[in-house]
Image (cartoon, rainbow, N blue to C red):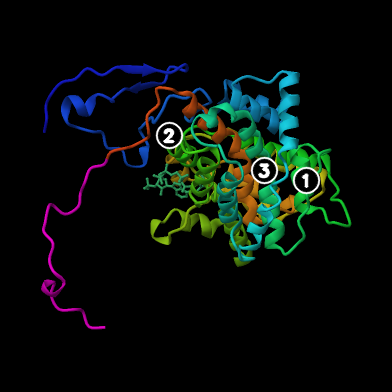
Amino acid sequence: MNSATLELPVIVGSEQEQGIDISRLRAATGCITLDEGYANTGSCKSAIAYIDGERGILRYRGYPIEELAERSTFIETAWLLIYGELPRRDQIRRFSDLLTENENLHEDMKYHFEGFPSNAHPMAILSAMINASSCFYPGLMGAANRERFDIHAARLISQVRTIAAFSYRKSRGLPIIYPKPIYKYTANFLHMMFSEPYQDYELKPEVVRALDLIFLLHADHEQNCSTSTVRMVASSQSNLFASAAAGVCALWGPLHGGANQAVIEMLETIVESGDDGSKFIAAAKTKASGKRLMGFGHRVYKHYDPRAKIIKTVCDQLFASLELRDPLLDVAKRLEEAALSDPYFVERKLYPNVDFYSGIIMRAIGIPKEMFTVIFAIGRMPGWIANFKEIIDDTQGRIYRPRQIYVGAPERHYVPLDARGPSAPR
Ligand code: ACO
């Protein structure tokens, strides 16, 4: 063990968070740090989102999530995340114009949708189609990443919604519905999802607002798995579309964005089995069962996720104003109540996260569960773009390249096939 002593600088963030800068450690001592799962590792300095997991605080560019949820819209918040300030009237107008100008996909992209099987998961289609978009907009690489950034960013935010709606229509064997320039962002998405060529979908303001809020609440969450993936890909100077497509893949898993679908599947299983929730809670506390209470727990929040609080209120408001009932909501509330007073969850600081109630709202709107993670991806796009921008704006930035501790075989030498022992019986 190398016993050298080394003084390391401490970096202090604007909210007094402290990080030890270990970038000179290996050069000076031969050692690296090992932090599997990165629970204790800061990968970058960022000015986009701030989370205090102990106190249940989330701010975008300094603005509390509760204020934005009450007063802003998804599109205004997207601009705030990407450009750092609340937009002036002319800035938001130009952004809206860019979104409208770019809402249609290149007509040839429609043929790509034909190639997917009808039961393809929409996240696979979303990631493939975002990446395929790179083919239609040459000149996305290198310096063009910066020079035409505004257009690429607006195009991606606008088209991810069109791709998502088209992939849903395709999975149902339904005709594609084109966007309508008169509609604002979220209304337009609902129109492309649910209108028919012979009849427009009836847009209810409370439904539009609830979905807009879901987008807004998902818009960024600092260095989570998918955002770190976007930064990783962007650090090699890949283009915006390729970086975002990688983010979609990372988001797909059930421990990340896929949890909203997993929550509904868990609630459905509980309701179908006639369990009042208590059997499931007991199983979730036993590792051998392989079950977890989906929508509970978070790597950073050791307190109620502030987004979950807002979503729960919106869920109650939507159900009241549309006079809806859903047995899944009743079970979810029972599970939450039971878990919040159960020592297993209390001791481990496991609270509802953003996914616990969002699926119930989307179900009420008529969005099928295999689209839930796609909705999350649409919402998260501004955060990914803002993080991509931080990478390309950093002229001192280096490619992301972690190290490892090798635990494999020591050096050995090649053995010819005939000398490797007898084959196992078939
Ligand atoms: N149900 C039951 N037990 C849980 C749960 C849960 N949902 N979450 C964590 N635990 C337990 C673990 O078994 C572990 O117990 P132990 O100390 O006895 O070994 C302890 O709590 C700590 O859990 P970790 O897995 O170490 O926590 P980590 O920070 O790695 O994981 C995660 C966080 C993945 C979110 C986890 O809580 C989980 O799997 N939750 C369910 C899935 C989910 O809702 N994901 C969405 C996250 S939010 C988002 O991505 C938008």
| Residue type for callout 1 | Pro
Q: Quadrant of the N terminus?
A: top left
Queried whether the magenta region covers residue 415, the answer comes back as: yes
Where is mark 1, residue-wise? 179
Around disc 3, counting alpha carbons within 10 Å, would you say few (fewer than 14), some (14 to 19), or many (20 or more)? many
Q: Residue at x 53, y 50 (%)?
A: 252
Q: Which residues are magenta?
A: 404-426
Q: Is residue 337 visible?
A: no
Q: Quadrant of the C terminus?
A: bottom left
Vertical relation: 303 (above or below) 131 = above
Separation (CA) of disc 1 from disc 3: 10 Å
Q: Secondary structure at mark 2?
A: loop
Q: Which disc is residue 134 wearing?
A: none
Q: Is mark 1 within 8 Å of ligand 1?
A: no
Of residue 150 and residue 311, the one placed in the foreground of this image is: 150
For marks 1 and 3, the one nearer the N-term is 3
Query: In the figure, residue 97 lies in which quadrant?
Result: top right
Vertical relation: 150 (above or below) 269 = above
Q: Are marks 3 and 2 in contact (CB under 8 Å)?
A: no
Q: Is mark 3 within 8 Å of ligand 1?
A: no
Q: Residue at x 88, y 55 (%)?
A: 199
Separation (CA) of disc 1 from disc 2: 33 Å
Q: Which disc is residue 235 wearing?
A: 2
| Residue type for callout 3 | Gln
For marks 3 and 2, the one nearer the N-term is 3
Where is mark 3, residue-wise? 159
Residue 212: x %, y % from top left: 71, 38
